[in-house]
Amino acid sequence: MSRHSRGAIPSSLTTADRRVAEGTSDDDGMRAVGPSLPYAVKAAVTGARSLVWLALGGRTDSSGLRILFYHRVAPAEDELSVRPQLFRRQMEELARAEFQVVDVLAIADLINRGLTPARTIGLSFDDGYMDNAEHALPVLQEYGFRATVFLATAVTDGRASFSWYSDQPPLLGWDEIVELDRGDVFSFEAHTLTHPNLLAVDDRRARAEITESKSELQERLGREVSAFSYPAGLFGERERQLVIDDWPQCAAL
């Protein structure tokens, strides 16, 4: 699995909020971005991918597998946020259209088994914002949907912060994360330590960001961590190989 290709979603969702689903990316085109992605760049990358995907002929049929990528669900003036009312409408549309909504590991399992069932969507949230639990969780519970939340562990516990915010939104705390991970909606997976642009850091830091985020999260959750999300979807062959070397069974996207 990678963020270089993914399936389509119902047209009502793509037109409702282009930030929800990210399309294809060009790794080399982002190598000039610094180690920490500025807010404007992160937001622009998120939005631009949807436009590229649509321009390249993104499908709106129900065949194949696809993943929806969210960040925040909040009534906030934030390019990375979907308003709660809109999020509910999107989930209602999926339920009405009889889509099965699962977490990222379920999508990986289907791919590994060579299965591509129609009307199946993976759901993901990057970064672990508090509003995921406040606004998204009740809706997901209502419809019986599951989702994966990817965490930058050093940001979660306060050793680092998301550089694109001058006033960072509240994040889920570890006690809440552990409790939610044991529930039936959210599962938590790795998203580096500090959320850098991995393409712009040296080999030693890139390896640490990938491998230590896995070990830290496993220690916190008391279970194996099986998926990794590249920050902003930016990765190259080096990053791919680092994941393979330390984490051969990982679902990386």
Image (cartoon, rainbow, N blue to C red):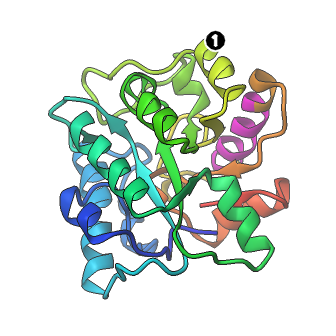
Q: How many marks?
A: 1
Magenta-colored stretch includes residue 213: yes
Counting from the top left corner in percent of width and height, residue 108 is at 70, 63
Counting from the top left corner in percent of width and height, residue 145 is at 54, 45
The picture quadrant where one finds residue 95 is: bottom left
Q: Is residue 101 above or below residue 175?
A: below
Q: Main secondary structure of the magenta part?
A: helix
Mark 1 Cα-neighbour bin, 10 Å: few <14, some 14–19, many ≥20: few
For numbered disc 1, what is the local secondary structure? helix
Counting from the top left corner in percent of width and height, residue 203 is at 67, 54
Q: Is residue 15 above or below residue 92?
A: below
Residue shown at the point (31%, 59%) measured from the top left: 45
On the question of residue 70 being in view, the answer is yes
Q: Quadrant of the N terminus?
A: bottom right
Magenta-colored stretch includes residue 67: no
- Front residue of 239/203: it is 239
* Residue at numbered disc 1: 175
Residue shown at the point (43%, 25%) measured from the top left: 161
Residue shown at the point (51%, 52%) measured from the top left: 123
Residue shown at the point (74%, 59%) measured from the top left: 242
Q: Is residue 157 left or right of residue 26?
A: right
- Front residue of 215/38: it is 215
The picture quadrant where one finds residue 11 is: bottom left
Q: Is residue 149 left or right of residue 208?
A: left
Bounds of the magenta segment: 205-217
